[in-house]
Image (spheres, coloured by chain):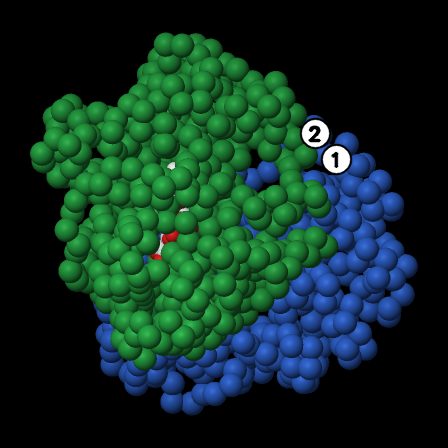
Amino acid sequence: MRITSLAELQAAVRGAPRVVARGAGTKPALATPPDGVLVLDLRGLSGVLEYEPGEFTFSALAGTRVSEVESLLAENGQYLPFDPLLVERGATLGGTLAAGLSGPGRYRFGGLRDFILAVRYIDGEGALVRGGGKVVKNAAGFDLPKLMVGSLGQFGVLYELTFKVFPRPDAHVTVRAVLPTLAEALAGLLRVYAAPLDVDALDLWPAPDGSGCELWVRLGGPETVLPARAERMTALIGAGETMSGPGEAEAWRALCELAWVPDGWGLVKTPLAPGRLLALNRELPPEALRRYCAGGNLAWIALPDPRALDSTLTALSLAGLIVLGAPGRPRMGVHPGVPFEQRIKAALDPHRKFPDFNPVA
Amino acid sequence: MLPALARLYPPERLLAQPGQLAAYESDGLTAYRARPAAVVIPATQAEVIETVRLCHQHRMPFVARGSGTSLSGGSLPIHDGLLIALNRLNRVVRLDPIQRLVVVEPGVINLDVSKAAAPHGLYYAPDPSSQQVCTIGGNIAFNSGGAHCLKYGMTSNHVLALKVVLADGEIVELGGESAESVGPDLVGLFVGSEGLFGVALEITLRLLARPEKFETVLAAYHSLAAAGEAVAQVVASGLLPGAMEIMDRLAIQAAEAAVHANYPAGTEALLIVELDGEAQQVAAEFHQLRGVIEASGAFEVHVARDAADRARIWKGRKSAFSAVGRLSPDFIVQDGVVPRSRLGAALAEIERLSARYGIRVANVFHAGDGNLHPLILFDGREPGALERAEQLAGEILTLCIRLGGSITGEHGVGMEKRDYLPRMFAETDVDAMHRLRLAMDPLLIANPGKMFPGGEAPALRHVGLHPLEKAGVIERE
Ligand SMILES: Cc1cc2nc3c(=O)[nH]c(=O)nc-3n(C[C@H](O)[C@H](O)[C@H](O)COP(=O)(O)OP(=O)(O)OC[C@H]3O[C@@H](n4cnc5c(N)ncnc54)[C@H](O)[C@@H]3O)c2cc1C
């Protein structure tokens, strides 16, 4: 059902026993409900409502394409530093927030959770509920906006979102070093992690055939000093070449579009800590492609059947989210917060109108 | 319930005599006070858990308390309830310099986290002015901020994981060691819940590498409006300073009297802008910043010469609240936020209100994020003075809401601003929050009477200095 106004949205939620919200459908694993559940297509709820560059904030309807927002911000020298994913494929703001997906840029200033300021959503009774505030700092009331990050729509249908934005660096360069093994690349990553250097993104990319590993370090800032900073970074790592210009931007853009995931394969997001990286890597099936992002805080794992990872993640006490793949239970592995989450679900969606993505239900 | 507590705690950690309780009757908002039935001082997490379970069993309202520096009455005891003082739970459980994280108990002092991390070149970014006294537990409850929020975010942006005993005794683990998560952001919901969900027992914090270089610029202006305009220009130039703070004449006077910060004489408004980061980057940005500041009409610009000079500049700013105590026997600190572009309008209106009420208002604020801190000066010995000051404070809150901002940027709603929550939020919004609260605390025993309107407010009464300060237990520097 195509929704084009707040009133329609409220009526639709009130009128159906179970609903699922969908933006552009770039993550079908998360937005395809079982039979009998009404899909609310939110692409008609689109548009930037407020944007004053001097405030570092904007508000937009949930169905607004991230690409539209990014161009508007770019005209004013600003950006969303967490590098939203699947922007060119049409991802919407609401879908991005609900899926909780941040890209490589989340390394420096934080992810979605650190940039969402306010939400308005429709609860199970069709009421419009607001949380947060449209200013860059606010401590009034419970932090509902953060709760919506990664909630997969289980507490309500997002209607309007307010984000904080930052000034975009003048330019970027990336130091790319190819190291003989993942362990050596990780050691390089940890040196960068510990250094007092301003790094925008810090990724590891093991070669599919196990023949080596690339370390990508992205630096942003005033163009005049970037070459010197890149040189310093190369010295710190002990290897590397500098990428710059359109090629550099394109390399990261392709990454954010998940262009490296083979057609038809699944993709799993797994929160990680750098100290757990080698243990996870060892347990992954050999054919799996992997990209370790945000200084080893995040693994993206591509493989033909993503569900096959469930037992591996469970054994390692890690959690996973199937971002690309067949619909079903997208959350795998271990989720210690579930008892707390179930209380929230019962409080905010007592009639279970919204999808229940509870991993242990 | 007291006998059950007496079995759990030795006498020196179970206080029930009036003389022992006096020190805990107030928090940083000394206008309110209430006497609890007892204070317990647990030394282990297990004792906290057992205590919360007893409270649940006996329907005994409780308040968790860190250092009691809340400026919104958040840690004010419940009359005849239990106060759980967490200062003994102050262990740094684990510091992992390689993964840049630290696990602490809630009673650990904010600054002690950075001290523990310092040998590894790391620090804990959120830096409330009270950081030498306030605890991580209190910071979590209020999502506390500091001067460096614009670039680095509030407390919430630095919390990775929490172990919590909910108000009904269940223990939950939220988050993990990763900066990323899947599933709803449960840590994000707990942070800022003002002690209404339960007690945080163990907190995993993210540490950052200490910036290689700082450039701290002090610019003096002949008017508050000019300083505000300079902030707008810095923002428009595309710079992202670590901090941008403004102090007005009255606040400067107070800071000078207290810590002799040597700010330029004859200043109406002082702007502090700090850049931090990688040396080469900061050098390039500093060049740009100088250009902006020099064109902004400052009559004097001073750049911190070295670390000691930088510390002196910040000492003046961070001591401003307590320093105002030298200008006036009593004051209330407000914490409203306005959109940055409305700062000028808000300050002009506060000036008008100050004149209308005949009450002096000093201003120190986080200009970078529009977070005002008007300090409303009054003498509590004058009959009706506190009530008038509170009325003025209320008008400022209403102003912030009208300008599209918030009633609190970092001090929390607490007891003080609970009647304003429903002015900022609609009924359905407050209802959703209340349902969440009930889900964590079905008996409404965790810090009842705070954040949400209604309930029995304790008598409003002026009591002067914080009792713990009088007793020499805490001080504000
Ligand atoms: C001089 C001065 C300057 C200040 N400057 C700033 C500033 O720059 N920025 C800022 O944000 N604030 C500032 N504050 C306010 C205050 O310091 C902060 O709110 C601080 O976080 C409170 O910490 P505390 O340990 O004193 O907490 P308390 O006052 O003891 O408690 C605060 C709240 O936290 C709850 N709580 C405490 N521990 C726990 C726990 N373990 N689990 C759950 N709930 C808990 C309490 O119930 C209460 O609701 C300032 C205060 C003063 C007096």
Query: Looking at the rendering, which quadrant does residue B448 occupy?
Result: bottom left
Position of the N terminus of chain B by quadrant = bottom left
Asked if badge 1 and badge 2 are on a common chain, one would say no
Q: Is residue A357 visible?
A: no
Give the labeled residue for mark 1: A229
Give the labeled residue for mark 2: B280
Q: Residue furthest left?
A: B383
**Residue in view at x 38 percent, y 85 percent:** A37
Q: Is residue A325 left or right of residue B126?
A: right
Instruction: Check whether the beta carbons of the residues at disc 1 and disc 2 lie within 8 A of each other.
Output: yes
Chain A palette colour: blue
Amino acid at dot 1: Arg
Helix, strand or loop under label 1: helix
Residue A66 has which mark? none
Chain B palette colour: green
**Residue in view at x 51 percent, y 85 percent:** A360
Q: Is residue B371 left or right of residue B177?
A: left
In 3D space, how far apart are the residues under numbered discs 1 and 2 (Cα atoms)? 7 Å
Helix, strand or loop under label 2: helix
**In the foreground, B415 or A218:** B415
Q: Name the spot of residue B49 as percent of width and height, x first.
A: 44, 72
Query: Looking at the rendering, which quadrant does residue B461 occupy?
Result: top left
Is label 2 within 8 A of ligand 1 (CB to nearest ligand atom)?
A: no
Amino acid at dot 2: Gln
**Residue in view at x 25 percent, y 41 percent:** B400
**Residue in view at x 58 percent, y 66 percent:** B176
Q: Residues within 10 Å of mark 1 (few under 14, many from 20)?
A: many
Position of the C terminus of chain B by quadrant = top left
